[in-house]
Amino acid sequence: MDIQPRLQAITRERYQLEPSQCDDGQLYHALLQLTQELCRHRAAPQGKRKLYYFSAEFLMGKLLSNNLLALGLYDQADALLKQWGSSLANVEEMEPEPSLGNGGLGRLAACFLDSIAALGLSGDGVGLNYHYGLFRQVLKENCQQELPNPWIGEESWLIPTGTTFTVPFGFGPMKAVLWDIAIPGAHTDVANRLHLFDVEHPAPAPESGIDFDKTDIAHCLTSFLYPDDSDEAGRLLRVYQQYFMVSAGAQLILKELDEKGIDPRQLCEHVAIQINDTHPSMIIPELTRLLLERGLSMDEALHQVAHACAYTNHTILAEALEKWPMSFLRQVAPQLEPILRELDRRAKAVFPDPRLAIIDGHDTVHMAHMDIHYSYSVNGVAALHTEILRKAELKPFADVYPDKFNNKTNGITLRRWLEACNPRLAELIDECVGQGWRTDPSRLEGLMDYAGDGAVLSRLLEIKSENKIALCRALRRRQGLRIDHDSLLDIQAKRLHEYKRQQMNALYVIRKYLEIKAGHLPPHPITVIFGAKAAPAYVMAKRIIHLILCLQRLIDADPQVNPWLHVVMVENYNVSWAERLIPACDLSEQISLASKEASGTGNMKFMANGAVTIGTMDGANVEIAHLVGQDNIYTFGASSDHVIGLYAHGGYHAWQYYERSGIKPLVDFIISPQLLAIGNDADLRALWTDMKEKDWFMALLDVEDYIATKDRAVLDYGNRSAWARKALVNIAKSGFFSSDRTIAQYNQDIWHLG
Ligand code: 26V
């Protein structure tokens, strides 16, 4: 299809200008309109069963390039824009990034929508339309500050549907307004939808910061994703958000069934509901309630619900396994209480073991327990994670429901995370193995034939180098930083959490700093880059950011050190930053405490872009290591079994490790005069104390092994052709981590969409 005439007509109509006279903002809006028109003409996929993927987060990233790629118009649009004096890259700068997610779980949901559509499966997302998103991170005075992140302009990807539902809150009914985002499938002619529910009259952005009236449910329910839940009003608001999403979503499901003329007594034959972590769990009692209203008996309703719902667990961190006091639920949705009590009564009648209870002795409702009893599938997100769920975290459940438990190792869409973000690498792959990998990622394996091909390996290094230059340019433009693009780029980009151990990486930086000051230079310059947001109420995470920023300052100002070492904290790490960082990365940091990272998905993105991983045997790192082999990954650290044993027996004492001669000077440097001169005394001291006395995620247990392993990687990096070979093997083996494979497995084992 030739899009030039329509684009021309749009710019004439909108601006009375030819495309070549338009600025990038005008071109962006013209392309947005065109893309929306083309998506509108796409039909929904057909199937006996339709999937509803319920998630509190969909971390979509910018949509223009992705949608053009799916429509098969990417190259044509780019060529036209170049002809008109711009480019897709420039025009894309005009697009605000939708801010509907937080980290891995939300980005996974977005990759899944992309793959579901690309496989031509009938499946829509259901979530909330947050106006100010997570938050926008600003780095000021060596600290993170939070600002609203508005992304919905006059025109956006949101399509008004005219559909509304009434959500029956305890305080009275509230209207839920449905907006849609089209999800066109690549290599198909169908499109699914992301359904986002919103309040009728959203509140304006807070004047400063992200504080707002958490009790003003009617206007603020969709203001922010994960409002600060350190107080009761914040926690209640989260329950309001969750019930709003599932009540409106359940009504949407029943409306669509009605429109197809299907009796709700056959719901489970026509509907699959994937519950993405526990945030949407109230879909179970809510759908049950609505089916009872439609005349089904409790037995009939529960049969339908339990054969429609499937639950994915994304974390084993206890604090993220949600449980709500019944008093909260009663306040938000009193009509759920009798249903929840009945669900609990029935579960207890069959399984009296109190560990399996939905409602415990304190009248607290355990959402994951409800999900497991009333779903037909429970899955973990990587082989190790599922094994830990089965053998430890959820063992009592796996013992009574062995057949419900299954693994679905996460995946990423290579369309965004390779084709779009690293087009030169994609072209090189085309030249080697043909274009078939774009629809069948297992063909990336064909690259293994080039592991000894000097010409291909040097092309690979050239492409990496170009991507590094582009990243350094972006860092200079956006943050005024001067980074040596020839240095080894070592990147840790993910949410900030103690279990992910950015603090351990900071200890490596301190070690290098001290070595350089003592005259021991590394074999080549190293740049350690962090991208991370800390949850606003997570004090320790903010202190780790503070430490990193203080180190950045210290090193930047030291001419003895900065030719050899840099530390960079990227401001406001988001999908767009990830798309620049990942193609430029040499060494990918995946250093969580073994057993704590359910899967990780950044690890897969870095690998597919030819970064070599340094990582613990945790989450999907285990599968990566297995695929690429020990020569092509740097693994270190205690095993998950060992770590689980330490927690079980209280066998870890940070101070024993702190006293070691290789560790103490690094930890003590946190409160050195140099750092105290830059940073905040109380914060650095609190971090120091925590690290040597508590260190809940055992950074000191692994830090020596980590430093030795990383030093080995840094040394190996000097052998450029051997390093390029490692990169090539990583790319070749990354096909397994395509979310198309993951979704095909979900469909085959769980959804059966037909
Ligand atoms: C839970 C909570 C609860 C307290 C308030 C804030 C908050 C925010 C997020 C969550 C859920 C986090 C779960 C999550 O993101 N898990 C990640 O899921 C990825 C996709 O499966 C996986 O790759 C990561 O390893 C896992 O951490």
Image (spheres, rainbow, N blue to C red):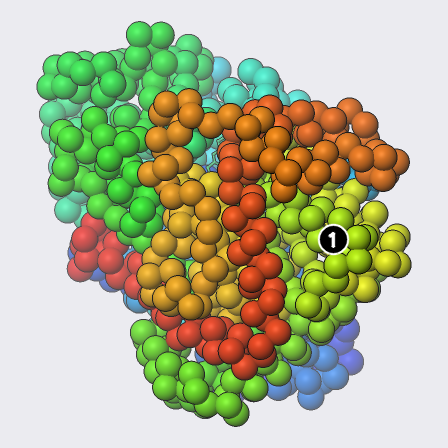
- The answer to whether any part of residue 333 appears in the image is yes
Direction from residue 732 to residue 690 in the image, left or right: right
- The answer to whether any part of residue 258 appears in the image is no
Direction from residue 224 to residue 525 in the image, left or right: right
Which quadrant of the view contains residue 34? bottom right
The answer to which of 485 and 647 lies nearer the viewer is 647
Which quadrant of the view contains residue 680? top right
Question: Residue 216, image x and y in percent?
Answer: 61, 22
Question: Residue 364, image x and y in percent?
Answer: 36, 14
Q: Pointer 1: what residue?
A: 515
The answer to which of 706 and 484 lies nearer the viewer is 706
Disc 1 marks a residue whose amino acid type is: Glu
Which residue is at a point 69% across and 40% down the rendered structure image? Answer: 666
Ligand 1 within 8 Å of disc 1? The answer is: no
Which residue is at a point 38% across and 60% down the rendered structure image? Answer: 625
Q: Secondary structure at mark 1?
A: helix
Residue 142 vertical placement versus 448 (above, below): above
Neighbours of disc 1 within 10 Å: few (<14), some (14-19), many (20+): some
Direction from residue 723 to residue 510 in the image, left or right: right
The answer to which of 63 and 530 lies nearer the viewer is 530
Q: Quadrant of the C terminus?
A: bottom left
**How many numbered markers are drawn?**
1
Direction from residue 194 to residue 212 in the image, left or right: right
Which residue is at a point 78% across and 80% down the rendered structure image? Answer: 21
